[in-house]
Image: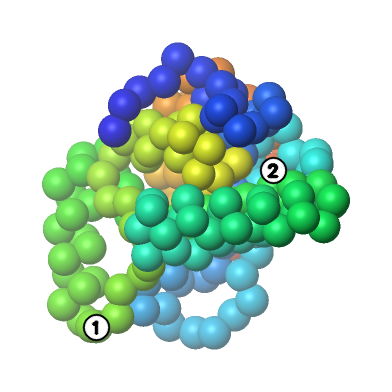
Amino acid sequence: MSEHDSAGTPGEGSPCRALRVALALNSSGHHPAATTETVAERWIELGASRAAIGPVVRVSATDLRDAARRARALRADAARQAIAAPVIFLEVGVLIDPEPRRALRALARLDRETDQTASLRYVGSPRGLAGFAADIHALDIADGIAVLPLTMPGSATHVIDGLLEALAEMGFESAPEAVGAARRFLVGAVA
């Protein structure tokens, strides 16, 4: 994955849209082996630029080619209907750690407990996830990512502390009130 100078650089087809990042919060994580209960998840968009230009759509895909195909279809459908193009969040199952090998070992333990896997995943460091998100945006695959932490609170904490810091270095501006709400949720989840 390449690193980008600015997380706000639009892809060729995007009319100056900033990278968007949303975080899915639940009490146990999104990996089937980590999920201990069925609860409604809470989504928090972490960026300062949260105004929706069009309808917000979460896209689940098996890989980036599938994601690009689905996004093109959604945008083409909006154009045919002469409505605002959707704001597309690509769902990504995430297991991150400042030490990427720890994240890989944690995923291997989870995957041994179940044969189900998330669709699109990122496993590695917060900085690597920042580059992945910026690439998805720059290539106009999606307007941003919807982060589904595979474990809680670990991956979600690394998203808030590590990912947002790495994205800030690329020009991404987070929303302090949204970040605070996510932190409060995590404190409640581990209490």
165, above or below 70, in the image: above
User: Residue 10 or 191: which is nearer the viewer?
Assistant: 10
The disc placed on residue 114 is 1
Mark 1 element type:
loop
Mark 2 element type:
helix
The image shows residue 113 at horizontal and vertical percentages of 21, 81
The image shows residue 12 at horizontal and vertical percentages of 56, 28
Disc 1 residue type (three-letter): Thr
Disc 2 versus disc 1: nearer the observer: 1
| Location of residue 61 (image quadrant) | bottom left
Q: Residue at x 85, y 51 (%)?
A: 82
Crowdedness near tag 1: few (<14), some (14–19) or many (≥20) residues, C-alpha within 10 Å: few
122, above or below 21, in the image: below
The image shows residue 124 at horizontal and vertical percentages of 26, 45
Q: Residue at x 21, y 61 (%)?
A: 106
Quickly name the residue at label 2.
178
- Mark closer to the chain start, 2 or 1: 1
Disc 2 residue type (three-letter): Ala
| Location of residue 136 (image quadrant) | top left
The image shows residue 27 at horizontal and vertical percentages of 52, 70
150, above or below 52, in the image: below
